Amino acid sequence: MPASPIRKLVPLGDEAKARGTHVYHLNIGQPDIETPPEFFDAVCSYREKVVAYGNSQGIRLFIESLQQYYASLSIPLNYDDIVITTGGSEAILFSMMAVAEPGDELLVFEPFYTNYNGFAIMAGIRLVPIATQAEDGFHLPPAEDIEASITPRTRGIIICNPNNPTGTVLRPDELYAVRDLALKHNLYVLSDEVYREFVYEGETQSVLSIDGLQEHAVVMDSLSKRYSLCGGRMGCVISRNRRFMDVMLRFGQARLCTATLEQVGAAALVAEGAKYFTPMISEYRRRRDATFEELQNIPGMLCRKPSGAFYIMAQFPVDDIEDFAAWMLRDFSENNETTMLAPGPGFYATRGRGTNEARLAYVLNAPECRRAVALVARGIEQYNSVNRKG
């Protein structure tokens, strides 16, 4: 089980804070935007005398709110097309286990959300990585290159759109290429759509709205980012495939139910509609632009401006990103400040990739994002003056 690149440096960060150093956290996708008050109001208004077990599928109030949300996206869903999960994490794990037996394979485009690695190990599934490149914005390779990785044990293709960690928004032609491969080889398309609203240029499309994928499309979703509700652990799995959803419900029965109070609060948030999204996306666009502009000022830094999510995957002018990220917390500070990064290798399944890359989450306000990246720039200068090989 690999350590998370997002969290494994936390002990060094805690030590830095104990020394009085302020740490700018660009390592984790934890928004600083306040959770909307409707969540707390709904939880505080809960009047049942017992917080009892809920239905394994989820409570009706929450499921019906999600039906209305997807209907607003022109995606009509039946009630039984949705199973509530304990965050997007459980949605991903359950989906992997539903479509693949131990020893089976799922195709994934790297770099990818680091926890796919851990979930696959838990499920006994082999992830087959397909490389994407920073130079072309981490877009998908040609269909024939993807098809070359399909074997008799391939059960599905995982996509993340908009992407974590790259911020890439897939074009329609890329989505339809994935669809055609799924139909040709009878594969599931597991689509991580947690960052659906976080699009700054262009548009995103759910696999649920792609013709021909009715029996193949699985959406793994979460409220964590959309409503700044990361600790609420509210997610869902959606599919129109009845056999798949039957298995999903049985997994839900095995873990009994998800948290009742969080579902009550989450339903109140979803019922508010999209009123929070427009100002939130405008704020994240400012943060993205500030972070990207500062990165462009660092000699030797390679990155592309992301079109979605709230991450930038950048190639750093250092030889060992793991060592550099630890050094920033252990040995560097300027005016008692430093920055925590998420080292790149943890976002890959291919050993040796990402050794000079890091993911930056622009979840701080724009001035703090600028300051955090400026500290990275100072750190690179100092680190390379004493550590650069050759």
Image: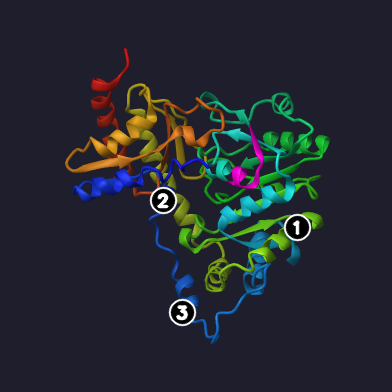
In the picture, the disc for residue 247 is 1
Place residue 380 in its image quadrant: top left
Residue 127 lies within the magenta run: yes
x 77%, y 38%: residue: 182
**Residue 233 point in image, percent of width and height:** 52, 61
Secondary structure of residue under mark 1: helix
Is 390 positioned to the left or the right of 87 in the image?
left
| In this view, the mark in front (2 or 3) | 3
The CA distance from mark 3 to mark 1 is 34 Å
- Which residue is the site of mark 2? 283
Sequence-first tag of 2 and 3:
3
The magenta stretch is 119-128
**Residue 177 point in image, percent of width and height:** 73, 33
User: As rendered, which of 44 and 199 lies closer to the eye?
Assistant: 44
Contact flag, marks 2 and 1 (Cβ < 8 Å): no
**Residue 249 point in image, percent of width and height:** 72, 62
User: As rendered, which of 301 and 199 lies closer to the eye?
Assistant: 301
Q: Is residue 62 visible?
A: yes
- Say few, some or many: other residues with alpha carbon within 10 Å of mark 3 (under 14 / 14 to 19 / 20 or more): few
Sequence-first tag of 2 and 1:
1
Contact flag, marks 3 and 1 (Cβ < 8 Å): no
Secondary structure of residue under mark 3: helix
> Looking at the picture, does residue 55 appear above or below residue 132?
below
x 75%, y 45%: residue: 210
Place residue 372 in its image quadrant: top left
In the picture, the disc for residue 44 is 3
Is 84 positioned to the left or the right of 385 in the image?
right
Q: Is residue 294 visible?
A: no
User: As rendered, which of 274 and 45 lies closer to the eye?
Assistant: 45
Secondary structure of residue under mark 2: helix
